[in-house]
Amino acid sequence: MTRPPIDPTTTTAWQELAAHHARLVPDLRGWFRADPGRAERLTFDVGDLHVDLSKNLVTDETLALLVRLAEEVGLTERVEAMFRGDRINVTEDRSVLHTALRRPAGATPRLVVGDQDVDADVQAELAKVFAFAERVRSGEWRGVTGEPVRTVVNIGIGGSDLGPVMAYEALAPYVQEGLEVRFVSNIDPTDVARTVADLDPATTLFIVASKTFGTLETLVNARLARAWLWEQLAARGAIDGSETARADAVAHHFVAVSTALDKVAAFGIDPANAFGFWDWVGGRYSVDSAIGTSLAIAIGPERFREFLAGFHAVDEHFRTTPLARNVPALMGLLNVWYVNFLGAHTHAVLPYAQLLHRFPAYLQQLTMESNGKRVRWDGTPVTCDTGEVFWGEPGTNGQHAFYQLIHQGTRLIPADFIAVATPAYPLRDTEGDGADVHELLLANFLAQTAALAFGRTADEVRAEGTREDLVPARVFPGNRPTTSIMAPALTPSVLGQLIALYEHITFVQGIVWGIDSFDQWGVELGKKLALELAPALAGDADALAAQDASTRGLVEYYRAHRR
Ligand code: F6P
């Protein structure tokens, strides 16, 4: 029986944080000037991640109070409960064990939950995924015409897409030559049509990735892909139209990843070609399960193991490090500070690493599907704001688009800056001054965080010779909070570490707010209404009549204009 959440706003720490906030005058310039040890004291290493929290709007007292808040809401106990496999996903009555997916083989003591030997099951499924990945990579797995796979198309959406595509992009330099992975997610027919348009069906393998195997988008796209495969193979004379030939084509060109293996079989995919996982892995926490099969094919089992080891390093840090030095805990608490005491509505994540260009999109599902909640895990209303909007784009592109608002707008936007020391492509501007281009990128990374923190005063602007009437527009107020995260290079392990870091940050915030970060009931209503609306779009007068006036008008517009 899960205990009811503790209302954070009733804790002593919350009251003291409120009083502290009322007294606090953020002054990063002054704080850095007066305290030469600030940067060092507020910089932490977790695994390979070097995390500098010193440019946040906090003093030692703020952090101590935030840690007390975590203690008062029982964070440590909840962390243990998660790792142990307690059913902390209360509204779905499930354990939350994505951390089990990355436990190394032979970890002790063994993780057994109820009657499931979790470690044994995880390793067995991983072995199956890896054996399959090796068969594809080596060319042993052949299509109906006897040709090896050149393109893998992952069909999935949400957690069955965002994690794999983000990681595939991030680890592009590790992808086996001659192999490509593409991703289809949207039910917009454009997505699948464009993705397969130039593919050779004989060398294409589809992975249908769906935890539930009931998601409309994925099932429709899988059927479209299957129809395309049959049609294209038949057009090339590779198969005839018989049932047997079609089934054979599916057996050679379709595999699946799901927790619902019965539904996989009903789709026509041989269960022997299906990889499973468990209901205790949330979709948005599943890139390190069999949902990552496309990634395992692309980068290979050895690199995938490194990826998992990266997650595990951060899991261990999170589970065992005292809160005052626990990086995911501190970062989650900082987010609570910004949301609940400083009124932040959004949080930017700004990778200074082009390969991480899908990382913000991935984080949007992780953080917003997890913490966008208005009731707590016992069904009572939340007692404070929850769930900030996460967003971002790679630097320096963002600098030329939305940084203006972060620097000089009226809203507080905490931002995480992410960079690596060694680039994947160490190019020099040989036609220019010979500069190491990665250093130009890093110079921007450093310049932005410094400008945001320390700003530029009116006197400094005047001292540059600026005309008096232009001074106000050129002042940078500073005290815009940032966290800088650096790593040696974007390796599979570092990527795993980054993902685990944000998973646990999200969890920490959810625990403080008393919400179930592992359900997602908010996505259900729209799905149900879409099913009711489809007949109206297709011309069913009764279905149309049942709609509100606005929806009816839009459907009528569609029907009048559809060619
Ligand atoms: O609609 C939201 C959601 O349930 C996500 O949580 C999930 O990642 C996504 O849909 C896809 O679900 P599935 O993997 O079951 O197809």
Image (spheres, grey):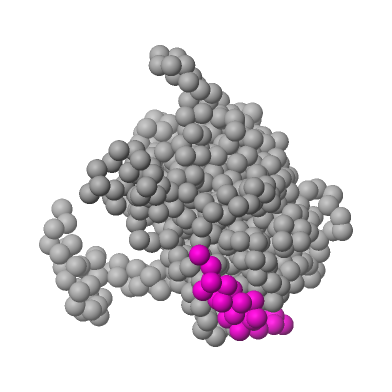
- Residue at the far right in the pictured view: 109
- Taking the spot 49% from the left edge, 50% from the top edge, the residue there is 453
Please state the horizontal and vertical placement of residue 250, each as a whole percent of the image.
51, 44
- Taking the spot 29% from the left edge, 52% from the top edge, the residue there is 472
Residue 157 visible in the displayed image = no
Depth check, front residue: 112 or 430: 430
Depth check, front residue: 512 or 456: 456
- Taking the spot 37% from the left edge, 47% from the top edge, the residue there is 459
Residue 487 visible in the displayed image = yes
Please state the horizontal and vertical placement of residue 145, each as a whole percent of the image.
51, 30
- Residue at the far top in the pictured view: 431
- Image side of residue 155 versus residue 462, left or right: right
* Quadrant assignment, res 409: bottom left
* Quadrant assignment, res 10: bottom right
Number of marks drawn: 0
Prevailing secondary structure of the magenta residues: helix
**Magenta span includes 11:** yes
Q: Is residue 535 above or below residue 179?
A: below
- Taking the spot 25% from the left edge, 47% from the top edge, the residue there is 468
The residue range painted magenta reads 1-25
Image quarter where the N terminus lies is bottom right
Depth check, front residue: 105 or 511: 511
**Magenta span includes 77:** no
Please state the horizontal and vertical placement of residue 201, each as a whole percent of the image.
44, 35
Please state the horizontal and vertical placement of residue 440, each as a whole percent of the image.
47, 29
